Image (cartoon, rainbow, N blue to C red):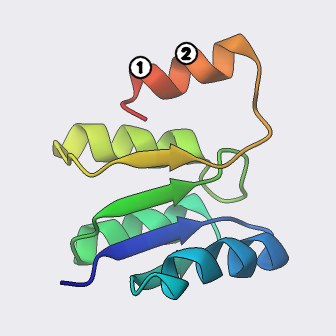
Amino acid sequence: MSKTVLVTEDDSFLRETVKAVPEEHGATVLTAENGDQAIQTISQQPIDVLLLDIFMPVKDGYAVLEYRQAQGLQFPVIILSNASDHVSQEKCNELGA
């Protein structure tokens, strides 16, 4: 059975590059350019994994994590970001990533 992966990244080159990997392994890959689009996608259909950038326009990755947590959703989240400071890491962990 094919898994559904949502890639949320505002940079189109990175989004398409990241998208290629799960596609090569047979996953259905959806994409979002910002956190608002990610939340819309998540609210409309089930996903199995979220690959998530943190710093994006409209709504950031933290807003997506907060939405996921508020809705009680349990799919795994992998953070794809240059936010490597301890505070950002801790915030992502607290929000279930």
- Which residue sits furthest front? 25
Which is nearer the eye, 14 or 33? Answer: 14
Q: Position of residue 61 (x, y in %)?
A: 57, 47
Which is nearer the eye, 19 or 91? Answer: 19
**Disc 2 packing (10 Å; few <14; some 14–19; many ≥20):** few
Q: Would residue 4 appear left or right of 71 to someone viewing this image?
A: right
Identify the residue shown where x is 62% and y is 65%. 34
Badge 2 is on which residue? 90
- Label ID, residue 11: none
Q: Would residue 40 appear left or right of 17 to someone viewing this image?
A: left
Which is nearer the eye, 25 or 18? Answer: 25
Badge 1 is on which residue? 94
Q: Position of residue 57 (x, y in %)?
A: 72, 58
Identify the residue shown where x is 18% and y is 84%. 1
Q: Would residue 10 appear left or right of 23 to someone viewing this image?
A: right
Q: Position of residue 44 (x, y in %)?
A: 25, 77
**Amino acid at circle 2:** Glu
Q: Is residue 29 above or below residue 46?
A: below
Q: Marks 1/2: CA distance? A: 6 Å
**Amino acid at circle 1:** Glu
Identify the residue shown where x is 16% and y is 42%. 72
Identify the residue shown where x is 40% and y is 87%. 26
In the rendered image, which quarter is residue 54 located in?
top right
Pointers 1 and 2 in contact (C-beta within 8 Å): yes
**Disc 1 packing (10 Å; few <14; some 14–19; many ≥20):** few
Q: Would residue 10 appear left or right of 95 to someone viewing this image?
A: right
